[in-house]
Structures are given as C-alpha cells and as structure tokens.
Image: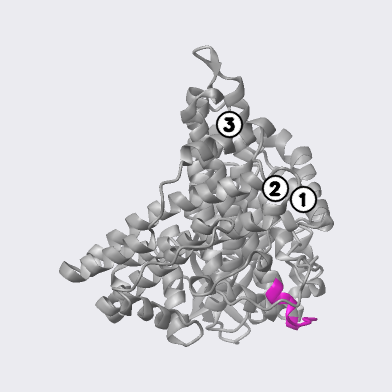
Amino acid sequence: MTTLADSGRAFIQGGSFLIETRYPEEIFTPEDLNDQHRLIAQTAEEFVQREIVPRLREIEEKKPGLLRELLRKAGDLGLCASDVPHQSGGLELDKISSIIISEKMARDGAWAATMGAQAGIGILPIALFGTDEQKTKYVPKLATCEWVGAYCLSESTSASDALHCSTKAMTSADGKHYILTGTKMWITNGGIADVYVVFARVKGEQFTAFIVERGFPGVIPGAEEHKMGIRGSSTTPLNLENVPVPAENVLGEVGKGHQIAFNILNIGRLKLGAGCVGGCKILMIPALKWAKERQAFGHPIADFGLIKEKLGGMVARTYAAESASYRTGGMIDRFLLQAESGPPESARRILEALQEYAVECSILKVAGTEALGAVVDEAVQILGGYGFSEDYEVERTYRDQRVNRIFEGTNEINRLLIVDMLLKRSMKGDLALIPAAQKVLDAVLGPPLADGEGKLLDAERRLLDGARQVVLLVAASAVEKFGEALQEEQEVLGALSNLVIEVYLLESALLRAMKASSASDGSAQFHLHAARCFADEAADRMEVEARRALARIAEGDALRARTAMLRRFLKRAPLDTIELKRRIANRALELERYPFA
C-alpha cells in the first residue's frame, strides 16, 4: 500500500538529518493519512473499545485464558499480521499502518506488551529470516494468533550484553539435533507461548537463533513474575533442560543470530516509540477532563496557569515525538517503494530499510518512552491524590509505562548505539558526518549564523541550523580529544546522543508545522505554537548537555572558544512559552483531547 503521494521522491539517507536540510514536502506527517489508514485506525480503536476497555480489570488480575482469547480476536481482524509479508500469510501493510495500530493498542500497558510481542518479536524473526519450510509451518498460525509467539534473548547476567549469553546449543551425536541448555529471563508471553525464538551459543561460541516449540522435551516455562507494572501480561523465565531442537529449526545461519536480534529490535523500537506516543494521547483525555471538572478556590483547576503549563507542555512534547514517529515510518515506506520487491526479495528489503534507519528507530524508542514518562507524571500530578489511587487508570498507567525505558534495549544502551552507529557510518564513508564536524571545529572564530528573511518559523529554522552545528561541534571535539578511547567516555556519548535526539525531534516538529501551515481547519496556528514551544525548550536542554560534554572535553582557552561557539549557535530571542502553552492548553481543553488527533 502506497503511503506517499509521490513514491518517486528521492530516498533519504538514515542519519542525514544532522548534515542535510530537509523540506516539509519530503516528510510524512499524521495529517497525510489516507482513507485506508483511517479505516485501520477505526478498526483498531473499535477493537480496543469493544474488547480491551471492558476487561481492563480482568487483564490486570490475569484471568486464565483471557490473553489468548483477546489475541485470537485481534488475529481475526489482522491486527497481528500488519508487518508479515504476503507470502507468509500476512497483510504486509506499510509502516505507517503499523504505527497506527501500535498507538491504538497502547490503551492498556499489559495488553500493549502482549500484543506487541506477538505482532513483532514473536512473528517477525521467522517471517523475515525463516526458510520457506519454517515460514509455512509457523508464520500463518502466529499471524492469526492460533499460536502465540515469544522472543527469548535476555538472561539474568546478560540482558544488555545479550550476545554473551550463557545458553548453550550442542550438536547431538547423530547431528540431527541441537541440545539447548540454559535459562532465559523476562520473556513476554512466556507463560502462554506455543513457539519461542531462542538465542543460544552453538558449542559455547556461535551466537545462533532457534525455533523452539513448547512441546519439545525439556522446555519448562517458569513461574509468572510479580511485576511493578504491566501485571496483566505474562512474563516468565524459560528453562531449557537438554532440549532437543531439530537441526532444521535453526533460524537463519549458525553464528549469525546477531543479525536477527538487532534487526528485529529495530522494528520493535519503531513500534514501541509509536505506542508510547499513543499512550501520551490517551492520557490527555482523563487529565483534561479532570482539569475541567475539579474545582479549587471556586474555579476549575484548568483555569490555573500552572495546570495550563503542564497541559501545554504535555501536548508540545507529544507533538514532537509524534512528528518524528510518522516521519520515520514514512522514510521506511519510501525506502521500500524504491524497488519492486516480490518474494523472496520483500523480506530482504524490509531488513535493509530497518538497518538504514536504525539510528532513527533508537531515537524514537528513547524519545517516545521518555515523553510518556513525563506526560504520565504530569497527569498524576493534575489528578492529585486521585491519580495515586488504584480506582483511577492513571495510577496503573504510571506503573505500566516505567518498563518501556527497559524494553527493546535500555535507553542507556540505545543512547550509546545512536552515536556508535553514526560514527561507524561516517568512518565507512556512508555518511559525511566527520568531515562536516571537522569543518565546524575549524571555524571556531567564524561569524554567527546569518539572520533570516522573515519566513515562516524563520527563527526556529535558524535555531535548527545552529543545533546541528552544536552536535557537530561536540562530536568533532570529542573525537579529537579521545580518539578510539571515546567509547569509554559514556557520559560524553550520552550527552552527544541527547543532542542528536533533540535535533531529530526539533526538525520533525518544525517541518510538520510548516507543512500544516495552510491547514483550513483552524489548527495551523496550534501546530506553530507546539513547534515553537518545543524548539525553545529543546535549545535550553541542548545548551545544558553541550556544556556538560564540552567541560569534559576541553579546558582553558579551548573550552572558552567552544562555549562561545555554543552560545552563538543557540542564540535566540526570549520566547513567551508561557503564553504558547496557555494557548495550546486552551485548545486541548476545548476539544477535551490531544488537539492534533
């Protein structure tokens, strides 16, 4: 399904947002959704309202058999097959459709985790990497949720360092089986799954993926974990006691399991980021409703400035994360449209697309999960004591969302990956990041950025240009100072990653607002308000992060010169964000929802 009106537009290189100027017409935004997208959104929303909302308490209390029942109903609607290629019995929808479904499933954290594991990491390793025989045997039943899938990567001692797992796979004497021994931890759907994708080291060395059926001898799911949040989802260890796995159940190639693990995590990050955006939107409804109804000192608390500041900030942060989410989905779809990809090439092209935009997927994961954490915290504060009560859903959401910063690679790991992937691409000559960074460093005493010409969001676009220069300044300074030892300076890498994230979200928000400037539904000015508000606060955050990193990198005159550059790059007139947030909040209160839905 085509998502872009002009599928012939040039492919946009992953990571190039740091060194190239993009234009509004180049990106996909939520305002570009077509009729088919809206139908998918309606179907997903109706499913959630009909099947999930009435059973939230039962989900939380882990009613036996309920999750499998709900998965089957979702499978009947095709909601679990959106990313599965046609030849494997899936719908092979575009990634915009996947984002839409992920947003709608975020109505409940436990359900979102269950559904996300099934539709993503439970099916896609086999759908994208399996042999024809494996796809025929497993994927159709997983896509319809007749079977439930699970993904077994983490272990108690190697969660973030997954490639150094201790689970072993030894060849049997007759060579027909691999004998798996070990324990996997934190397995979503572990207690209800029929099929597990398990990662083990063949002969203790070669990291490899296997398809393991629940009925194989020695497969023993452990007891359900007692968790802070997402209590209704199934999370268990998986014990493997000399499990004989047929040799034909090796997934991919022996020793190439990392290719499966990393690529599947990329799509997991894309969809998790989108789900968190959906969670932000959903949370605003009770927060806005409460703010209008709750009385204090003779007024609804929505009348008070500090409440409006919270509401406006919630909207602006969600706006930026949402803009980046749809932009990334659109770029992946455009990549896939560059070539006709019939079987078996479609799976390879999907993997290429995920690799191309791995940096952006990690950004979405970090930005989305942290946006949801900030939004739910404000929602609890707006509800006050009631937000702390189990009688209100905000309390459960507060607990449920916390794990998102741990799922799909911790946010700390993703921050390190963002910088590592960018630097590796530049070293290979695939992305001209280092030359651009060196050019900035060579111009320490250069002139400030030129004033604009009074165009739409001109000050913010100049700020964006300066923000890019800040990233390049810090990157060049760090590489010059530490060289190969930079990998040991995790605090600097973390600060640099935060700068990269801010640039991507900032540009995404500005491009979307510019594209929406001609909207005839009265929303154009609020797009501008949200983008300007986010831009100003992003610049503040960038200045703090850059100063912290530069103070580690340089000293004396060199530090003074670099901080002078930093001030020049982020120079801007004070912006009345108080007024902007009031206007945004008033619009959201009027609509009683996220104002860009």
Q: Which residue is under mark 2?
A: 104
Q: Reply yes or no: does residue 339 show up in magenta.
A: yes
Name the residue type under label 2: Lys
At a point 71% along the width and 81% down the height, the residue shown is 131
Name the residue type under label 1: Ala
In the displayed structure image, the side of residue 565 where residue 427 appears, left or right:
right
Q: CA distance from mark 1 to mark 2?
A: 7 Å
- The secondary structure type at the circle numbered 2 is helix
Horizontal and vertical percent position of residue 432: 47, 82
The numbered disc on residue 287 is: 3
Which badge, 1 or 3, is on the more N-terminal residue? Answer: 1
In the displayed structure image, the side of residue 413 where residue 50 appears, left or right:
right
Crowding at dot 1, Cα within 10 Å, few <14 / some 14-19 / many 20+, comes out as many
- The secondary structure type at the circle numbered 1 is helix
Q: Are marks 1 and 2 in contact (CB under 8 Å)?
A: yes
* In-front residue for pair 367/248: 367
Q: Residue furthest front?
A: 453
Q: Which residue is under mark 1?
A: 41
* In-front residue for pair 515/166: 515
Report the number of numbered marks.
3
Horizontal and vertical percent position of residue 540: 38, 52
Horizontal and vertical percent position of residue 330: 68, 66
Which badge, 1 or 2, is on the more N-terminal residue? Answer: 1
At a point 49% along the width and 81% down the height, the residue shown is 431
The magenta region covers 334-345
Say if residue 112 shows up in the picture.
yes
Crowding at dot 2, Cα within 10 Å, few <14 / some 14-19 / many 20+, comes out as many
